[in-house]
Amino acid sequence: MARVAFVLADGFEDSEFRLPWDAVREAGHHAVIVGRARGEVLTGKKGTEHVSVDAALGEVRPSDFDALVVPGGHSPERLRREPAAVAFAREFVDSGKTVAAVCHGPQLLADGEVLRGRTLTSWPSLQRDLEHAGAHWVDEALVTDGNLVTSRKPADLPAFCDALVNRLSHVHGEARP
């Protein structure tokens, strides 16, 4: 069983949290919401999701987890202003563990200065920001570059979730049916 951190702040894209969260849990893995303060209640930008932070950024380290998921929405914009969130994401990418970011999620990675020479996708409006961070941006539903898994939007979530769960199934040598 893999342990997966979902890093969130208020205004996350509801479906970009819910679908990967459910996919990870349905595959038998342990999912943890990491945010600014333990117990803080966060609301998705559409208001359909309300979640409580399981662990504060200062309480956990990437070594506690096997993968990181960064949903989009307004959450990555808020998190990129938090040095602890940027450091957490940077350490995750540097560790070689899976980092899966969808839509606006790569904003957090750009601030961690870990995208130089990497190929990824995102919501189209982030193209220039990611290119300025040194990434090669492509307009595709799913892009995998080493330990980075990225997708553009909610419509891409089936491929994103499949790629994430498939990678998690290999963390502990599990075979996926």
Image (cartoon, rainbow, N blue to C red):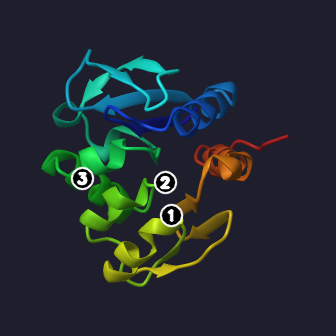
Residue type, label 3: Arg
- Contact between labelled residues 2 and 1, with CB atoms less than 8 Å apart: yes
Dividing the picture into quarters, in which one does residue 92 lie? bottom left
Q: Nearer the viewer, mark 3 or mark 1?
A: 3
> Label 2 belongs to which residue?
101
| Mark 1 vs 2, N-terminal side | 2
Residue behind mark 1: 148
Does any portion of residue 117 appear in the rendered image?
yes
In the image shown, does 130 or 149 lie closer to the viewer? 130
Closer to the camera in the image, 71 or 14: 14
Q: Are marks 3 and 1 in contact (CB under 8 Å)?
A: no
x and y, in percent, of residue 115 in the image: 37, 74
Amino acid at pointer 1 = Leu
Identify the residue under disc 3: 80
The residue carrying pointer 2 sits among few (fewer than 14), some (14 to 19) or many (20 or more) residues within 10 Å by Cα, namely many
Q: Amino acid at mark 2?
A: Ala
Residue at figure coordinates x 51%, y 55% from the top left: 103
Structural crowding at the residue carrying mark 1, measured as other residues with C-alpha within 10 Å and reported as few (<14), some (14–19) or many (≥20): many
